[in-house]
Amino acid sequence: QATVKEKFKTAVVFSALMSMLMAGLVSAIVTAVTSGMSNGYLGRWIGSYVVAWPVAFVVLLLLRQHVMRLAIYLTNNKH
């Protein structure tokens, strides 16, 4: 059985990795759709990613457990 410290560490690492992936993909797509992939795309994407990632990380860290409970409830699984 994992300790509270180990569970917290896992939650932080999961939240960091998932938020990096999601913020990177979403900001890349939204940047391409709103301003095109012309000159300066990479800089615009990095600029939006730098704003999006910390927000996504904090939100995921705070809401991960609640969303997991909701998913378990909606799927009638017993965890």
Image (cartoon, rainbow, N blue to C red):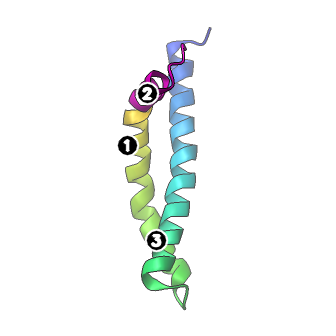
- Tell me the magenta residue range: 65-79
Quadrant of the snapshot with the C terminus: top right
Give the crowd class for mark 2: few <14, some 14-19, many >=20 residues within 10 Å: few
Q: Residue at x 54, y 90 (%)?
A: 38
The Cα–Cα distance between marks 1 and 2, rounded to whole angstroms, is 11 Å
Residue 20 within the segment the image draws in magenta? no
In the rendering, at what x and y percent does residue 70 appear?
Answer: 41, 27
- At numbered mark 1, what does the secondary structure look like: helix, strand or loop? helix
The residue that appears at 53% across and 54% down in the rendered structure is 22
Q: Sequence order check: which comes first, mark 3 or mark 1?
A: 3
Q: Which mark is residue 30?
A: 3
Which amino acid is tagged 1? Val
What's the distance in space between the residues labelled 3 and 1, CA to CA? 19 Å
**1 or 2: tag closer to the N-terminus:** 1
Q: Position of residue 45 (x, y in %)?
A: 50, 73
- Residue beneath label 2, please? 65
> Callout 3: few (<14), some (14-19), or many (20+) C-alpha neighbours within 10 Å?
few
Give the label, 3 or 1, closer to the camera: 3
